[in-house]
Amino acid sequence: MSPIPSAAASSRIHPAATAPELLRNFCIIAHIDHGKSTLADRMLQLTGVVDSRAMRAQYLDRMDIERERGITIKSQAVRMPWGVEDKAFALNMIDTPGHVDFTYEVSRSLAACEGAVLLVDAAQGIEAQTLANLYLALENDLTIIPVLNKIDLPAAQPEKYAEELAKLIGGEPEDCLRVSGKTGAGVVELLDRIVELVPPPTGDANAPARAMIFDSVYDTYRGVVTYVRVIDGNLNPREKIVMMSTRATHELLEIGVISPEPVPTKGLGVGEVGYLITGVKDVRQSKVGDTVTNASKPAAAALGGYSDPKPMVFSGLYPIDGTDYPILRDALDKLKLNDAALNYEPETSVALGFGFRVGFLGLLHLEIVRERLEREFDLDLISTAPNVVYEVTLEDKTVVTVTNPSEFPAGKIGDVNEPMVKATILSPSEFIGAIMELCQTKRGELQGMDYLSEDRVELRYVLPMAEIVFDFFDQLKSKTRGYASLDYERIGDQVADLVKVDILLQGETVDAFSAIVHKDKAYAYGVMMTAKLKDLIPRQQFEVPIQAAIGARIIARETIRAIRKDVLAKCYGGDITRKRKLLEKQKEGKKRMKTIGRVDVPQEAFIAALSSEPAGSAGGKDAKKK
Amino acid sequence: MSPALPEGDQAPDDGRLPASVVAGADARAFGVYLHVPFCTVRCGYCDFNTYTATELGGGASQHAYADTALREIELAASVVADLPRRPVSTVFVGGGTPTVLAVPDLARMLGGVRDAWGLVDDVEVTTEANPDSVTPESLAALADAGFTRVSFGMQSAVPHVLATLDRTHDPRRIPDVVRWAREAGLAVSLDLIYGTPGESLDDWRASVESALATGVDHVSAYALVVEAGTRMAVQVRRGELELPDGDDQAAKYELADDLFEAAGLGWYEVSNWARTPADACRHNLSYWRGDDWWGIGPGAHSHVGGVRWWNVKHPRAYADRLDRGLSPAAGRETVTGDGAVLERLMLGVRLAAGMPLDDLPADSRRSVAGLVADGLVDGHAATGGRRIVLTRRGRLLADAVVRTLVS
């Protein structure tokens, strides 16, 4: 039969009435830019779910921002029919986020699948984040289907990378499928292989329902749309359901599958993947990883693996125009509806005015949130250097959690704990020396090193997370000419010799520039920051000392000399209007300045001092190979 | 005149002024500025509205220029007729280089002013002049025509500095031209520029000393400003010249002020020094005091009772409008409220006479103490005389003082 099943065959794969053995749930593990979305587009076309006329590039990536960055943040599940030897199957493709910040979401997406397509660019080979997700998939006992994409590219080296993949997951290089998402070559074979190799789901149809939430999206018109994978039992329209973590009961207003637009169904049975709408308005009421069960016949135990998203990186976000503060607040409130990991609280900075201290999953998350705030809400923002969360034990043994350097306790303190990460770096072997040197300066400890192939190596390090959020990405990239890729995950804390360095302007602390750094790096930070500010702050009518200090101890100092001349030499009849307008402009400019003590500091100086912090530019796209 | 005209409101074709300008006109002096938009050489640093071609066509050509300017004087006379009658107390002919015009042309223009409004008995009539465009005869002829004062563009006494400035005159000629002017009965001023790329502190000292050696009674000294659009700005951008540094200019200002004071010349405005109050340039004082004046010529600015306007820039466009019986004004503005306060301040604090403290809004008065503490405003003048008078450091930071007072 044709790969698109006939009407007769399709009748056997109606949602809520599909035998589990006819279901195949899979995801695609790929690095950003390795062509996952394009491959998904081809699958949608070949299975007849989307016709060519309605096709648009990267169909499944909903938000503009994702489309532009070429990355998928919100996973979705698409149900596609596929026929093999007269038999119709229902394939559920679960889209997974590709970045380190969203590891938890990835793990839940993987838990919704029995198989994973490991998609690797045939011209670039596997990347660190893909490798991390592959290990995650292997831990979940997923069946891996290795696929090399972009075989149409002249630079493709399928033999080389097939061998690399075979080495990583076992098996023969010949098992590696070769496809082109762009031309469609090999995609039919891939769909066949998914049916052939991915195990059908198993579950107890008669047990109380247990469905795992693997994604939750806020829609302006529908409220929260929750994506679930049914493990046991079944969910039916209009019944009451219970979220097992919160015990909250909701009525199912709609249940259905995505194909690729939402289609209401008579329910979802064992092994099936679909969506629920309950009318809740906040994704926090429908949390990823939670278990949904029937209210009438609730399951005794929730599915495992649930955890609350924990912010790992904090940054202060401030509107450049102080009057935008209420807009920023409303904007964060709106984004929060669709982002369970986003949390924030109001914060006031002497230098920057009113803003919010915002917690993020990581740097990409930070960057995406910031970009959405600026784009969707037309805000101009300034963000302080990102920092991690420290646990400071005071002498009296009380523990203070520090998410903002300015909260770092003064005076005598006991231990300071900082979060650590396990980092995996994949790189051509020629850069090993440079990478080791970099990791050394970042207080890293080498855990191991393996050759993936003759000229590609995997390095494993334990590093303080603070060093990663600072400027690690950028430096790694520049030291390896863009070839290295990085993945990391949290692995607990370590006690470290950390100090808070304050920056003082004419004796007044500028809170936005306080930083928690390792003792050995305090001096370098102080010298760097005072020098930077000296260049950025205009000379005043008086001398201005800029100091870096640890507590009361000054560790670096620069001086902005008093300005000596600020007068237009000539001011005759024809100069008056022009000169008055110039002064009016300067007067307006002075209004926009922040006054620290008596020092007028233009907003731009803060922005320049903060934004040239390399951390702001780190993100998913930066870590990729060029 | 700076080359870029300000943004303003549309000026009416007949040049009529609003009725508001009449109030208080009796108390304001009335002066006339005559612009001569021609030079023989264009200097690299100069951003004034001036042209080196002799033939710009029509009424814009050098030989026809006096007649064109006279037409604007007639128009001005009809507009000003609405105000109380005030004879002209000062006339200033600037450029460009006024002395590229023949003395009879300059005399005819001055005659036009006299015919239109009359001149006060002790009228001050100044012309700017290049040291190499005058002779004992031409200076005597100017005096005969009614001129009382001449301001020479000396700029520097140091050949390499003059070369950087594209000035063509021989510095050795300065004592001669000063003597000739004095012999003709003219009061004399010398213009100096400091902070030219390549000028050392000693170069500057030599220039100041050589100006003082002429025994001159009035000096203007200006920090060089490299204006956008000038040839010098291009040279700076290309790295051929190093931009004058503010600290260097401040040091040179202080040196000059010391030398002038020692020679008996006191500052009466940020960039102007005179031997006695009578030696000050009354025409220029009227700019800083907010008096009325009419600027004749392309690109010239005028001020009457809070209304400021400026003429079209190009001599051709200027002549065309006058040919068609239209006002040559390109735009105008009426300065009121905060703008007027700012203007009074920025002009008033430039003067050694300062400005009355009580003319300031209450908010501004409150920031005076801080400025005294910072050494920018004279404490005695502020407390005793209730006037804001800048200290020398304050003069160098006059704009910062103004911003502090209005913020």
Image: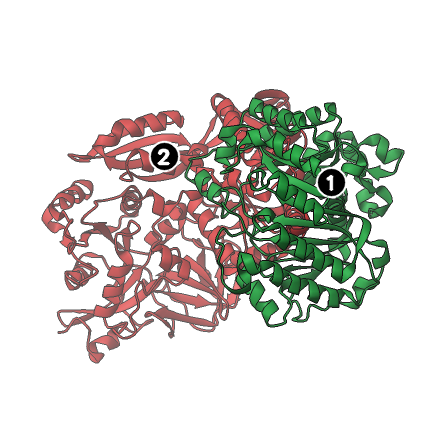
Quickly name the residue at label 2.
A475
Residue A430, quarter of the rendered image? top left
Q: Is residue B55 found left or right of A170 in the rendered image?
A: right
Pinpoint the chain carrying mark 1: B
- Is label 1 in a helix, a strand or a loop? loop
Residue A623's disc number: none
Q: Quadrant of the N terminus of chain A?
A: bottom left
Disc 1 to disc 2, how far (Cα)? 53 Å
Q: Quadrant of the C terminus of chain A?
A: top left
Q: Is residue B359 above or below residue A503?
A: below
Quickly name the residue at label 1.
B350
Q: Residue at left 75%, top 57%?
A: B114
Nearer to us in this view, A57 or A239 = A57
Q: Is residue B300 above or below residue A522?
A: below
Q: Is residue B329 found left or right of A253 in the rendered image?
A: right
- Residue extending farthest to the right is B384
Residue A75 in view (yes/no):
no
- Which amino acid type corresponds to the residue marked 2 in the rendered image? Gln
Mark 2 Cα-neighbour bin, 10 Å: few <14, some 14–19, many ≥20 = some
Callouts 1 and 2 in the same chain:
no
Residue A230 in view (yes/no):
yes
Q: Residue at left 19%, top 43%?
A: A169
- Which amino acid type corresponds to the residue marked 1 in the rendered image? Arg
Nearer to us in this view, A592 or B260 = B260
Q: Residue A196: give x, y in percent of width and height.
A: 16, 60
Q: Residue at left 33%, top 69%?
A: A260
Nearer to us in this view, B144 or B176 = B144
Could you tell me how many numbered marks the image carries?
A: 2
The chain displayed green equals B
Q: Is residue B57 found left or right of A76 in the rendered image?
A: right
Q: Residue A15: give x, y in percent of width and height.
A: 32, 71
Q: Is residue A269 found left or right of B123 in the rendered image?
A: left
